[in-house]
Amino acid sequence: SAGIDDIKPIIIKEFSQLIIKPLLHIFNFSFTQGCVPCATKKANVTPIFKGGDPTSLGNYRPISVLPVFAKILEKLMYNRVL
């Protein structure tokens, strides 16, 4: 599903040949500088009801949906660490 940037994964797949070089530049810069773009740190957070009293905030758990690019960067970093 799309994150706060409203970009769906299917768009990334369909246009991957056009965006691969700029993305590689951003991702490699992140690796060499040890930082990530601010936009990858933002997420849509939705409360999901767990059960019990619906008026109690403790009965909800937060689900965060990250931008697609953040998920890609996270997976690349994870694979580099291993």
Image (spheres, helix red, strand yellow):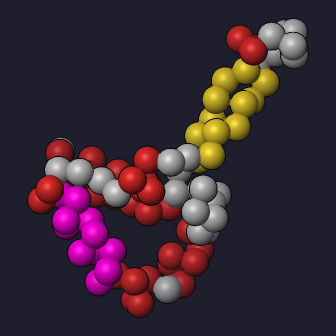
> Going by the picture, which residue comes out furthest to the bottom?
18
Q: Is residue 35 above or below residue 18?
A: above
Q: Is residue 58 left or right of residue 63?
A: right
Position of residue 25 measured from the top left corner of the image (x, y, whole percent) = 24, 75
- Looking at the image, which residue is at 80% across and 10% down? 56
Q: Is residue 73 above or below residue 58?
A: below
> Going by the picture, which residue comes out furthest to the front?
38
- Looking at the image, which residue is at 59% across and 74% down? 10
Find out whether residue 24 is within the magenta segment: yes
Comparing 64 with 38, the one in front is 38
Position of residue 50 measured from the top left corner of the image (x, y, whole percent) = 76, 20
Comparing 42 with 47, the one in front is 42
Point out the image quarter for the C terminus. Answer: top left
Q: Which residues are magenta?
A: 21-31
> Going by the picture, which residue comes out furthest to the left?
32
Residue 48 visible = yes
- Looking at the image, which residue is at 49% across and 86% down? 15
- Looking at the image, which residue is at 19% across and 67% down? 28
Q: Is residue 43 above or below residue 12?
A: above
